[in-house]
Amino acid sequence: MSDPKPVILCIEDDPQIRRFLRTGLGAQGFEFREAETGELGISETAARNPDLVILDLGLPDLEGVEVVKRLREWTNLPILVLSARSLEGEKIAALDAGADDYLTKPFGLGELLARIRVALRHAHGGGTDGMSVFTVANLKVDLARRQILLDDCQVHLTPIEYRLLAALIKHAGMVLTHRQLLKEVWGPNHVEDSHYLRIYMAQLRHKLEADPAQPRFLLTEIGVGYRLAVE
């Protein structure tokens, strides 16, 4: 027997977006379910137990952030926010409420599929939590040995640079807010010290990127945080 198709539930009030996703995701082997309102989306999540939720923030009955909070009361399934809202504060609020990732409309189907694959890998135990070696392109990080290789040449990092890279690897492919990274690397007393993050991210880029001004691995989500590329 073949494996069951991953179920994607889309909570979105725009019928054109739902139609586009139904066609695009269906062609990629996903089972597509949909809900037009936040309340219906919460009910459908409980009834159908999808593998991933795609969520719009501008719903007719509930704010998307409220939907995230209510889902997080009882489930850890991946939530990918897909919204036309591009204000930094709204992105941060959704991620801090418990969303796993955020993609702004208009979007490309290819990038959405890549984000979905990353979220499903993390959810199904195929993320980097238990992985000892992380590899993308010419960058290889052996977490067990604390060894970083770029084009097979060893790169020396300071302890804080290494902790920052390890935190990004732990959540590779997903957006981490400034506050999330500051808390994980420097501790809860430093969540407002965003200048620490700018300084050490710049140092990491100079050591790992061919062109620090156009990073290949350490990607900026403007005003929100950073994401480590996985493809």
Image (spheres, rainbow, N blue to C red):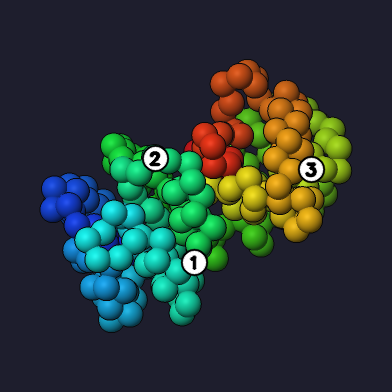
Give the labeled residue for mark 3: 162
- Determine the residue positioned at 48% across, 41% down: 88
Q: Amino acid at mark 2?
A: Ser
Task: Work out how far the residue at label 2 is from the one at label 3, CA to CA, in angstroms.
Answer: 31 Å
Residue 112 sits above or below residue 139 on the image: below
Task: Work out how far the residue at label 2 is from the one at label 1, CA to CA, in angstroms.
Answer: 29 Å
Whole-percent x and y of residue 210? 65, 20
Callout 2: SS: loop
Give the labeled residue for mark 1: 124
First reached walking from the N terminus: tag 3 or tag 1: 1
Callout 3: SS: helix
- Determine the residue positioned at 82% across, 43% down: 160
- Asked whether the residues under the numbered discs 2 and 1 touch, taking CB atoms below 8 Å apart as contact, a structural biologist would say no
Q: Is residue 168 visible?
A: yes
Q: Amino acid at mark 3?
A: Tyr
Q: Residues within 10 Å of mark 1 (few under 14, many from 20)?
A: few
Q: Which mark is residue 86?
A: 2
Residue 34 sits above or below residue 45 on the image: above
Horizontally, residue 155 falls left or right of residue 14, namely right
Location of residue 139 (image quadrant): top right
Horizontally, residue 125 falls left or right of residue 114, namely right
Whole-percent x and y of residue 149? 74, 34
- Determine the residue positioned at 46% across, 56% down: 94
Q: Amino acid at mark 1?
A: His
Q: Which mark is residue 189?
A: none
Whole-percent x and y of residue 162? 79, 43
